[in-house]
Amino acid sequence: MSMNNQGRPSAIPAGAASFDGVTGTVTGNRGLQIEEPLIFEQDSAGRTGVDLPDVPKVASRLGAVKPRAKVGLPGLAEPQVVRHYTRLSQKNYAIDSGFYPLGSCTMKHNPRLNEKMARLPGFSDVHPMQPVSTVQGALELMDQLAHWLKTLTGMAAVTLAPAAGAHGEMCGIMAIRAAHEAKGDTGRTKILVPESAHGTNPATAAACGYSVDAIPATADGRVDLEALKAKLGPDVAGLMLTNPNTCGLFERDIIAIAEAVHAAGGYFYCDGANFNAIVGRVRPADLGIDVMHINLHKTFSTPHGGGGPGSGPVVFAESLAPYIPVPYVTHGKDGFALVENAGDGLAFGRMKAFHGQMGMFVRALSYMLSHGADGLWQASGDAVLNANYVMARLEDVMTASFEGPCMHECLFDDRFLKGTGVTTLDMAKALIDEGFHPMTMYFPLVVHGALLIEPTETESKASLDQFVDALRALAERAKSGDVAYFQAAPRLTPRRRLDETAAARKPVLRWTPPVVAEALAAE
Ligand SMILES: *Cc1c(COP(=O)(O)O)cnc(C)c1O
């Protein structure tokens, strides 16, 4: 077969009837899904999208510096460029095109009202270096968002600066370190992290210079309180715990956990990325949490995935509020002001240049105000209801990892596939043929072959039923012994089973012109 230098088929092989022997089509296209060559492969010398006047001869001002070769930009007409990028954009599967049940990441519908608000010129066209007197409205919006975040969490202070959940974690752990240092308590070198934690938790603790000690889970998927108590001591700076945790379970012992950590002189960091499961129902401050980040992009709207933008405000209880980083907004008789230097020397510094992600603040506040208290209460309730509905409808054909109801996501493991030869990965690939983005696979690590499903509050019963029916049929097919079907999946995608490890470890990110590639090969 004729391949381009990226290893993709580029023409019908001599003597063959179809492009790649799989599609059966001459073009490689599948219906209206077009086989898309790279933009460089569409190059046609001299073709251009603009008609420029001839350049008059001028003396070069580059002195001895002379171009050695052509720059190598491809020549294309405007409609070609438009089609190329439009088709590429259509290859993106997104929450706006279908159901996206990825667990732990909350891929939910983002109301367009919030987008409209974020694009208001008074918010979108401000510059962080403008005098504060000219951005009073933007500061007022930040102040209101801070107010509602504190109200919803019961906390004393908030910083809006962190750019993502993981950045918020770093902010919280830096505040914990600052608090211990302010007390002269320098012997605390460890952070405790449960086994089921999101990978960012241990990474954050390690990046802040702490060693990480893992706490095992109980048979019902919660933190083992006795094991935690056994690890607490004068060397422990704090605990990082996710609640609801990444098994989709509420940590029942959370108050006892907070008390034990405090009694040992540590601080309690809560990973609040899953706040969407409890917002409007539980105030983290009432659970004894000292500091927590909130992923605005998971709980309070804003599209995410594929590169953001994220926003990870961090709320602080009284215990850690003095160490909050700058800047923050204050409100006095002369209007709103930005505190860039706390003056008391306690703030541990700043998390980033300027004040954070303005567009996300607008979206989040717009989401809060348009939902109202009753709407937020209903959103978390519906998220939990939907997850429990999915779990209840699948329990008899798949194996739920833990007994009892779940929170915003439901967790299955691969015991139902035992002896079938079909794996969690095969199930996910077969689900793609059915038109669904797969759930989170193989995470959390505390169960074998995890399948973690987060439907979110925005899916209708009809869309959940369609998803469940597809999964039920696949589970039954696996049990009927049809391994071959799964091993050949996905069948209907532009590319079939990829070597995902090689794709991640050795990505081909550079196009090499064919002449150069040939020369390289000959060397
Ligand atoms: C998403 C998530 C994070 C990280 O958030 P980012 O914004 O992606 O950095 C941390 N913990 C949990 C539990 C999460 O779900």
Image: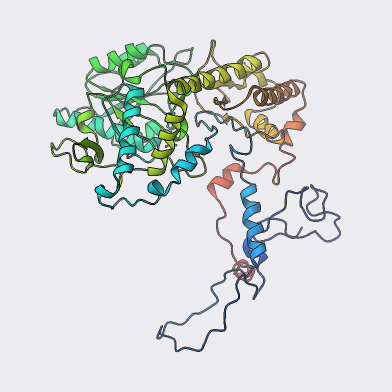
Frontmost residue, 91 versus 479: 91
| Relative height, residue 410 to residue 44 (above, below) | above
Work out whether residue 240 can be spotted. Answer: no
> In the rendered view, does 415 fall on the left or right side of 229?
right
Quarter of the image for residue 178 reads top left
Residue 133 in picture, x, y percent from top left: 25, 48
Q: How many marks?
A: 0
> What kind of colouring is applied to the model shown?
rainbow
| Relative height, residue 78 to residue 129 (above, below) | below
In the image, what residue occupies the spot 57% across and 81% down? 53
Quarter of the image for residue 422 reads top right
Residue 99 in picture, x, y percent from top left: 62, 32
Work out whether residue 95 can be spotted. Answer: yes
- Indicate the quadrant containing the N terminus: top left, top right, bottom left or bottom right: bottom right
In the image, what residue occupies the spot 62% across and 25% down? 460
Frontmost residue, 518 versus 282: 282
Residue 268 in picture, x, y percent from top left: 30, 22
Residue 141 in picture, x, y percent from top left: 34, 38
Frontmost residue, 130 versus 38: 130
- Indicate the quadrant containing the C terminus: top left, top right, bottom left or bottom right: bottom right
> In the rendered view, does 469 fall on the left or right side of 183?
right
In the image, what residue occupies the spot 45% across and 13% down? 218
* Ligand 1 quadrant in view: top left
| Relative height, residue 270 to residue 221 (above, below) | below
